[in-house]
Amino acid sequence: MSRLLLDRVLAGVPNGETPLRHVRELPERSAASADWPSWVPADLRTALARCGVERPWRHQVEAATHARDGRHVVVATGTASGKSLAYQLPVLSALSEDRRATALYLSPTKALGADQLRAVRALDVEDVRPASFDGDTPMPERDWVRAHARWVFTNPDMLHRGILPAHARWASFFRRLTHVVVDECHGYRGVFGSHVALLLRRLRRVAAKYGADPVFVLASATVSDPATSASRLSGVPCVAVTDDASPRGARTVALWEPPLLPELAGENGAPVRRSAGAETARIMTDLVVEGARTLAFVRSRRGAELTALSARHALSEVDPSLPARVAAYRAGFLPEERRALEQSLADGRLLGVASTNALELGVDIAGLDAVVVAGYPGTLASFWQQAGRAGRAGDSALVVFVAQDNPLDTYLVHNPSAMLDKPVEATVIDPANPYVLAPQLACAAMEMPLTEKCLATFGGQAARRVVEDLTADGILRRRPTGWFWTSRERPHASVDIRGSGGEQVAVVEADSGRMLGTVDPGAAFTTVHPGAVYLHQGTSYVVDDLDLETGLAMVHREDPEWSTSPREQIDISVLSVEERTEHDDGVTVSLGEVAVTSHVVAYLRKLPSGQVLDQIPLDLPEQTLNTRAVWYTLTDDLLAEAGLTKHEIPGALHAAEHAAIGLLPLFATCDRWDIGGVSTALHPDTGEPTVFVHDGHPGGAGFADRAHAALIPWLTATRDAIEACECPSGCPSCVQSPKCGNGNEPLHKEGAIRVLTTVLDAVAVSSPESKAS
Ligand SMILES: [Zn+2]
Ligand SMILES: [Zn+2]
């Protein structure tokens, strides 16, 4: 069936286009079920059978048994492999046996938590009284939850702001806490993940105060080395269960690259590809005509709506009954709307759904005929999670990955093994980041004074340094029994665990006073500077005023014919070098701390054709970010040997920097927008041509460190991506960047390949001589 579907889709490709880059057949996997462990109470078994679970799969029993025996465990298996049962079994068994025992469930999103709560309620196990406790829980109900619920469903934000600081009111809950479930734990990465790691240490410390030592059960998508990631996140050693024993149908995976459109020209005259969204709509149309139940994942909400709309339009020309069977889905749907959509897709009333990644978490859709993934979803774990919606046991299915116009997607469709044969990336967190540790330790000290012993829990030496700084600043006070929080006020509300970078800037319509949205303070100068055109749900506004003091950007409704793009000057200076490797031939690679100073100096007004109307100067202050970076230097002689003239060097380094930023998400679980770069033909601190790639968050989130550790595969992939692109001199698929502060100038595509080859040759052949300073 799946190969047949692919043939149908190929038959619909316009003449002269050859978008198919690779096809891979993934074989069927048969199921391995197991007996119910003897310790599962009969009532629970009956309840599960009533809800349709006749027998568990082997991995569910394996994980549940670890937890039952008191071992912290992470179950890391595919989509629809029944990870919920792996924690429901030990938790509900424990709650049935001891009528005073309690458990805590954490999920990164409210929607997922609500789904999991509903599933546990449906089991209706006597006396458990599962309940949610989050920002939406009404005040009167909160008292009831604290006093009576034995399984509390919440999220890290509420644990941080609502539960831990008020732990005395939760004393009876903590005293009996047997299990902590951390669902979708691969989602905790970067700054957010680092905060959650420290939050879980705070949780363990509070539980210990009341005499409890709960067992952690973590559920994860398939990631590489889940035991290490889970142990780092939870702070306790976890065993991993990875052998997925759920059945899965055979799948055909096709990698697809939309064609270049010769009639269009983009920035600096670069060629343009058909958009991934338009190509996806076309593919979905062909699949729906074949009667295949198809789910398309599109990266933006607007994109999902456009994809559904354009598929509907195309279908109306084939069969007037078909357009009604295609819908768009996005975050913000009510639970009932989601159920209805899942149901109609499951029973075939709906044939095509275009969705944002919102559907990825906590939605019960599996066994579809086809999944189309428009644009790399950021991690391999997400890709496989989305692809996992296709395929039923005994039946095969089609997965199409459609590349978006950026270097990472280009690389993947030209290097199928990077996508299909590689273990998914490890999640990156850095709980030792002082910018995360300081606010977390302040919160911890307010909850209970910090002692010498706690410092080990929070990371040893790194924690000690931070605590000493906090004490020197008068935020903590040292007494014989430990470090104390000195203020009356709780620090929690001002700690932003999602890492969005401090107080958000509110975008407000001046006439109506209506708040349209918020912008990260770090991004305010580039997105809502005076004169910027700001889009909100398809409506266009122009910014009148930006006031960072009050955190307000005032806008009015206006739809000018131009768009705006900021011009930014970025400087980087090296604060300290932690590692420096000198390779033969004069290439050096370093890792350390840097200060990145950015200054938005002007913006351009551009017509849709790309024509620049004018450049308007701005008077905005500089911003400085202290963070971590990896950088390499080359000598002028080496660049000359590589055939680059003086005049070509800046463009070559700049292009190499852009593409490297585009590829890093393949090696560190970050988003292209979480990192930045600077390249220069002569850097004052190194005295040489230098390319920097830096973390975008204060103190870093582990991305630069990861880039340094994976330097060779990362730069090799960068070079391969540029080489694979068929454009003549640079385009968004290879070296142009949507966030470039210099308007993607200068860029030298061929030169970037030479720079990267020179660096890689030196790093690969020389015997590295490491010097730490
Ligand atoms: Zn290109
Ligand atoms: Zn740039």
Image: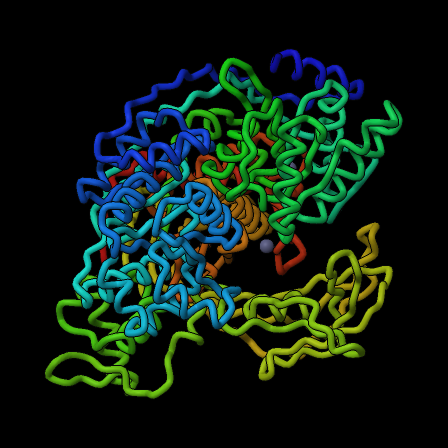
Q: From this viewpoint, is residue 60 visible? A: yes
Relative to 495, is 64 on the left or the right?
A: left
**Vertical order, 94 against 1 (above or below):** below
Instruction: Give the residue at x 23% y 82%.
Output: 484
Residue 78 position by quadrant: top left
- Colouring method of the image: rainbow
Residue 771 position by quadrant: bottom left
Q: In the rendering, at what x and y percent does residue 401 appear?
A: 60, 29
Instruction: Give the residue at x 27% y 42%.
Output: 93
Relative to 730, is 604 on the left or the right?
A: right
**Vertical order, 132 against 399 (above or below):** below
Q: Quadrant of the C terminus?
A: bottom left
Number of callouts in the render? 0
Relative to 560, is 365 on the left or the right?
A: left
Q: Nearer the viewer, residue 463 or 588?
A: 463
Q: In the rendering, at what x and y percent does residue 100 appear?
A: 25, 56
**Vertical order, 769 against 281 (above or below):** below
Image quadrant, ligand 1? top right
Instruction: Give the residue at x 43% y 58%.
Output: 155
